Amino acid sequence: MAAGLGYLRVLTVLSGSLAVLNGAGHSQSTEVSATGSLSSPSITSKETLRFTVTIKNKTNATLSSVRVVSVPDDYQLEQMCVLTEQAGTECYGSPSLLSSHNVFAPSILPGRSFTTWGYLKPKATHRVESLTLIVGWASSAATSDLSSPSSLAVSLGQNEVQSRFGPYKPLLSEILKGLAIPLALAIFGTVLTVILKRRDEQNARLDKEREVGRQDAEKERDQIRQKAEKERDEIRQERQRDQALKAETWNKMLPVSHEYASKYYLPVSNAAERLAAFLEKKNDEVAFFYLLFLWKRMIETINGVGGFYFKSLLGETLAVECWHRQKESLLGPDDAPLNLKVKGSMALLGPTETFQAFTVKLESLNSDPTFQNSDVQKGLELFREWTKNDGNVSDLILVLKAFCAVLDYEANRPYEYWYDPPARLKVSEEVETLLKGIAVAKKFSEEEIKAYFKGRIQV
């Protein structure tokens, strides 16, 4: 889980950088350019905001004493970090930066780029606004086209600083909305139960008064009838409590299930379906792209909600087992070469990346048809080597199809009272055999398995 959080943090920073390269957050002169990004569009007043700045020196002169001239309004500079050849990563706190006049790079050589990252601390809350960082430098060559000193504005992106309890206001509003109807139903049910109980007790007392003079046999029959009435009352009250509890649970879980399905489960299913399709077409490049996208979506799901939460425990078990099988079949252990390259490469994907954009962005500018990024290029080579085994590929395609079938079915099951007819599990004969085998291996009963596959559609 710690590794997953690390990957997500890298993904967040790189995604922001890619967005900056496409438009917002890109500032440049004719010879020196700079790009910036933020780790989050919204923070609270008690948090710090991570930022990243990359400076490219396209001049023939060395840029010296590269420093922060000005930070965004309503923020103060807490820390800056750089990567050095001597000591590796070095970070400077606010006192050190003040003593060095905010210099974070002694020099940037001609034709080189330099990346720094750090943290800004908000001074006050504010609405969404664009943050701009001013960096400056001096040119070490007298013949340089740059004036000394020079400076450049770097757009970091937009950010909002909320109060300490600001992020919880929407959640509290949703909770109150979700509880209103169940609470009203519970009160109505309680009042109705009390009225019915009082009426039944009054009738019982009147019947008892009328039966005083009757014979012993009639008294015995009255006792039997009273006992039966009491049992019916208890059954009716139990049903009312059960219905109220189900209604309350339904109203709470339906919005959550809808959010999880649309935001997490269906995007994961879509990526897995496309990976299987391009594996069948033997298109390794596009299949590798959708492998990265599948892992990106799955890590977002794990970090966002912790995994799968379906209406059926068997459905959760089937989805988790299919995911583990595809991981072991394709990527192997966490320290396996292909596993490491896939996790390193998926961080380069933007939130709405396409294969064409991904290819253009990473392809080398020379005639050699390779990727500039070593993780992507090496990962693609290892993936091509893996796909040479037709048995591995066919087994993985079957697992992916089973994974998609379960995700699609469980994403629509909460709406069984809306759809007519309700959602049904769509599987091929091979996929059904695989899923039932998993269910048996996980010790589910024959009745549970039969109920889950009832009404399934073979495709």
Image (tube, rainbow, N blue to C red):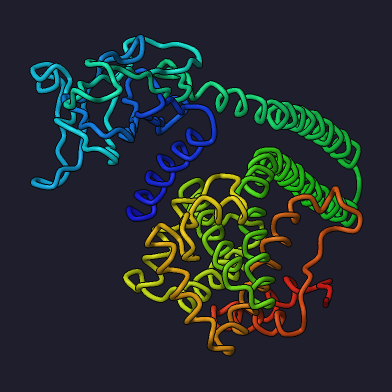
- Position above or below: 260 against 148: below
Q: Quadrant of residue 174?
A: top right
- What residue occupies the far front of the structure in this picture? 143
Question: Left or right: 198 with respect to 296?
Answer: right
Residue 320 lies, in percent from the top left, at: 54, 67
Residue 413 lies, in percent from the top left, at: 75, 56
Q: Nearer the viewer, residue 24 or 164?
A: 24
In the rendered image, which quarter contains the C terminus?
A: bottom right
Q: Nearer the viewer, residue 174 or 390?
A: 390
Residue 349 lies, in percent from the top left, at: 51, 50
Q: Residue at x 50, y 16 (%)?
A: 128
Q: Residue at x 17, y 20 (%)?
A: 102
Question: Left or right: 452 with respect to 118?
Answer: right
Q: Nearer the viewer, residue 360 or 307?
A: 360
- Position above or below: 202 against 410: above
Q: Quadrant of residue 375?
A: bottom left
Q: Residue at x 67, y 65 (%)?
A: 274
Question: Left or right: 206 with respect to 170?
Answer: right
Q: Residue at x 39, y 54 (%)?
A: 4
- Position above or below: 109 against 424: above
Residue 100 lies, in percent from the top left, at: 10, 20
